[in-house]
Amino acid sequence: MDESRIGYVVGEADPTEFWFSVDRERHPQRWDYVVVNSKEFVDGEDRDVQVLAQIETVVSQSLALNRPELMSVQAVERIVEENLVEPRILAKARVLGFMHNGEVLQPKRAIFPGEPVYRAPKEILQTFYSYPESEGLFVGYLISRPEIPVFLSIRGLRRHLAILAQTGAGKSYAAGVLIEELLKKGATVVVIDPHADYVFLSLKRDGKSYSDRITVFRTPKSTGRYSLPRRPETYEVKFSELSLGEIAFVCGIEERFTNILKSLRDALNALRENGDYRLEDLINYLQAQDDDSAFKALNYVNKLQKINVFGDATTDIGRILRPMHVSVMDLSGLEDSMADYIVFRLLSDIYSAREKNEFEYPVFVFIEEAHRFVPNKESTLSKDIIKRIAAEGRKFGVFLTLITQRPNKIDQDVLSQCNSQIIMRITNPEDQKAVRASSERMSESLLRDLPGLNVGEAVVVGEITKAPVMVKIRRRETKEGGADIDVVGSLRRAIEMVREEENKRGAGLREIREMMKLTEGY
């Protein structure tokens, strides 16, 4: 292990961090991993342990050049020529913990100054960032040690997950990797997809079939953002199956409006006597009534016309909830009110099916653009059911993954219920503040690292990992949807098209001139 020694602990240390002097010939990079020997009181006795830490800062200095405000170029040149620079390298490392009986424990004692610091062996890192095959989700590799694969725990998803990143940092891509891994483990996954980011999950990157256990759903009126290789299934709700309470809730009729509710109840009872009915039948019935309460009820019911999801039959929740299956609800192209109602209805049915044990397997729900459905201040139809799942869903096996580029805009109570977080590049100070407030495990040092992450890199904290980890998300096996357009390539094709048209017109004009020359002699 001496060959991997890179320095010695110096200065003041505590159980959470320490500084160490670095060997110039073995200069480590930021975010690399080191180990230090220490003693910890575990299971009633002192034990020798290896404490794993991650380098968060690397600085170099020189006593001869420590007054930059006094250093002219000539003075620096003389010091360099005389070999008097004598650079010193210091590194600061944050403690991640030590392993004991398969668990990561936090040290209670400070590292002693003078202790050797070693580059972390591959075996220790693999122990920290791996799980048994039955629960390990392979998501990528350590940023600083790409030979070390990183696995997350499927058990950790029981306490909900948030994937947070600014636009373009790779949050939807990372979610796609998780969905691939969950499908391999036999999971039932439902994806709320406002921008068609996940509609190509059934295809490999080269366009060939990946799995027939992935289904896209659309409403009867939805056109979707993309044409799909396989016709999507229809998601619709039979209007006559809606209860008075559900209609009142969707329309925003408060309980205190008793006369309006009575008119609506009378209308529904009358229509049910003739069997099934549609929204149009309810509207026509209320219009025919010479009653002020019926007229007011009509004003509320007219709002339902914007929700073009009502059809002749309600989609069986059993078509959406299937073992080892991914259902993608494609909401692209729909108005906000329609998308909001679909999320409300779908999540309510999922929660009910699990609460009543009508579906016996756990359900993993991914909500893209989560700030649209559970905003911080505004109210939406779907907000209450999402908050209920966040608070109580784990008891019934409904687990949330919330995905957003605006953590500052999402309901903070819901975000704080996500005990695990995958956080990618975030530069907005308000969003950083929201991330820090929502996670007890997100230290200030990790928060400072967020702007330095590249696309596809993430900090993972919480119950899905034994210790905080910085990971480069692996390459997806499936085709990505919803990616940004290739602006440069599109503009290049536009130039080529225009030039081709100009060449055709030029050729046509030359042909006309030649014909005119031939006819001049006649």
Image (cartoon, rainbow, N blue to C red):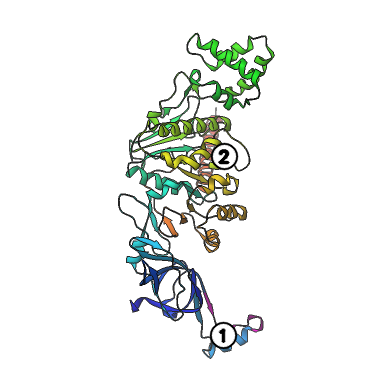
Label 1 belongs to which residue? 63
Residue at figure coordinates x 59%, y 35% from the top left: 380
Q: Secondary structure at mark 1?
A: helix
Question: Looking at the image, which residue sits at the far left?
Answer: 133
Residue 492 visible at all: no
- Mark 1, Cα crowd under 10 Å, few <14 / some 14-19 / many 20+, is few
Residue at figure coordinates x 50%, y 28% from the top left: 222
Label 2 belongs to which residue? 372
Distance between the alpha carbons at the discs numbered 1 and 2: 55 Å
First to last magenta residue range: 59-71
69 within the magenta span: yes
Residue 223, image x and y in percent?
Answer: 49, 29
Judge left or right: residue 185 versus residue 389.
left
Residue 418, image x and y in percent?
Answer: 49, 48
Query: Which marked residue is nearer to the observer: mark 1 or mark 2?
Result: 2
Q: Is residue 116 above or below residue 173?
A: below
- Mark 1 and 2 residues: CB-CB less than 8 Å, in contact? no
Residue at figure coordinates x 43%, y 58% from the top left: 471
Please state, as top left, top right, bottom left or bottom right, where the N terminus lies in the image: bottom left
- Mark 2, Cα crowd under 10 Å, few <14 / some 14-19 / many 20+, is many
Q: Earlier in the sequence, mark 1 or mark 2?
A: 1
Of residues 327 and 453, the one nearer the viewer is 327
What amino acid is found at the position of numbered circle 2 in the picture? Answer: Arg
Q: Is residue 96 above or below residue 220?
A: below
Q: Is residue 54 above or below residue 282?
A: below
What amino acid is found at the position of numbered circle 1 in the picture? Answer: Leu
Q: Is residue 29 above or below residue 331?
A: below
